[in-house]
Amino acid sequence: MSEQINTQQVELTKLIERNTGRDGAHATAIPCLFLSRYSSVTGPNYGVYKPSLCIVVQGDKEILLAEECYKYGPADYLVASVNLPITGLVTQASSQVPYLALKLELTSTQILDVLRDSKIGVDKKENPKRGMYVSRIEPPLLDAVTRLMRLLDNPKDIPVIAPLVTKEIIYRVLQGEHGGVLKQIAIDGSATNQISDVIDHIMDNYNRSFRIEELAEIANMSVATLHRHFKEVTAMSPIQFQKHLRLQEARRLLLSDPIDAADAAFQVGYESATQFSREYSRMFGFPPKEDIKRLRGKYEQTLNV
């Protein structure tokens, strides 16, 4: 890692420490900018990554997408170009050297605006690629991210300057080695953009059954092409994608509401409580009741530390 990058990361480390102070995920005064701090290894944690840029300045992290593993640390950055259900693990952290990271969520409108203004070439016919990748960090990108973080110390500047710096950050990512992946999400008519429409439909309707022909019609593709492109982008089939969403939401319901596993299963779209329990155990490693008891115990331990 270059001396310039080291210097930039030292400043970013101080900025994130100052704006978090305690373990957990933290929203900021800048819309769509989130900070994380953890003083011990964590996970597996389950969630959906929106299109976003993720940078670790201290520690290491792994993201699991279906059967694929994406590892990144201070020398890298991770980009998700579409909504993706993932499993996250902080793999290196301690009380002396806590894990510190930031996530900047992006929209297709922001990306399209940068493409228009920069006249970066696009090709609607380009084949879709995996909607997640890791690249080596470069000083110009890190510099723009540092300037965005500095705005947290000057809140009055955020409404005017934050959108400009965010635009530069997107430009730097688009110029990167795998920038074409992010580019395709914003291009109306591209296969990735069409698959994104299908992803959004599944996310909005995860608790109801659908026919694959219905999804193919949304994407304006044949059933075979939809299956192929969907798996290229998400590393899973539409049914597997829906299953991940259902099980994650069921787990959230069980943690937050006084309901039993059968009620949670019904609310997220399962017709068989037995099938739900079996698939829940396969994904989370424990049956629903045991898993929730274990998670609540961990939470209570954290409060008592």
Image (tube, rainbow, N blue to C red):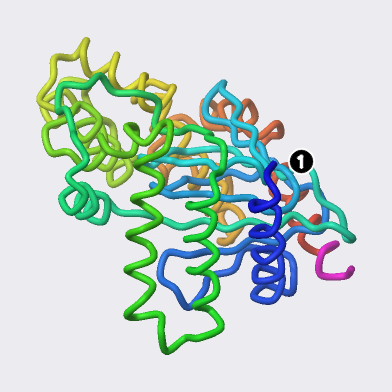
Q: Which segment did they paint magenta?
A: 301-305
Inspect the magenta stretch and tell me whether residue 303 lies in it. Answer: yes
Compared across the picture, whether 20 is left or right of 260 comes to: right
Task: Find residue 24 and report its image quarter.
Answer: bottom right
Q: Position of residue 45 (x, y in %)?
A: 64, 45
Q: Split into 4 quadrants, where in the image is the N terminus? A: top right
Q: Which residue is mark 1?
A: 91
Compared across the picture, whether 124 is left or right of 48 comes to: left
Q: Is residue 6 above or below residue 302?
A: above
The chief SS type of the magenta part is helix
- At 47% from the left and 34% from the top, the residue drawn is 244
Compared across the picture, whether 260 is left or right of 108 comes to: right
Inspect the magenta stretch and tell me whether residue 213 lies in it. Answer: no
Which amino acid type corresponds to the residue marked 1 in the rendered image? Thr
Can residue 263 be seen here?
A: no
Q: Position of residue 297 (x, y in %)?
A: 81, 56
Compared across the picture, whether 129 is left or right of 251 comes to: left
Q: Position of residue 115 (x, y in %)?
A: 21, 47
Residue at the far bottom in the pictured view: 156
- At 18% from the left and 54% from the top, the residue drawn is 117
- At 59% from the left and 38% from the top, the residue drawn is 87
- 66 or 183: nearer the viewer: 183
Q: Secondary structure at mark 1?
A: strand
- At 36% from the left and 40% from the top, the residue drawn is 175
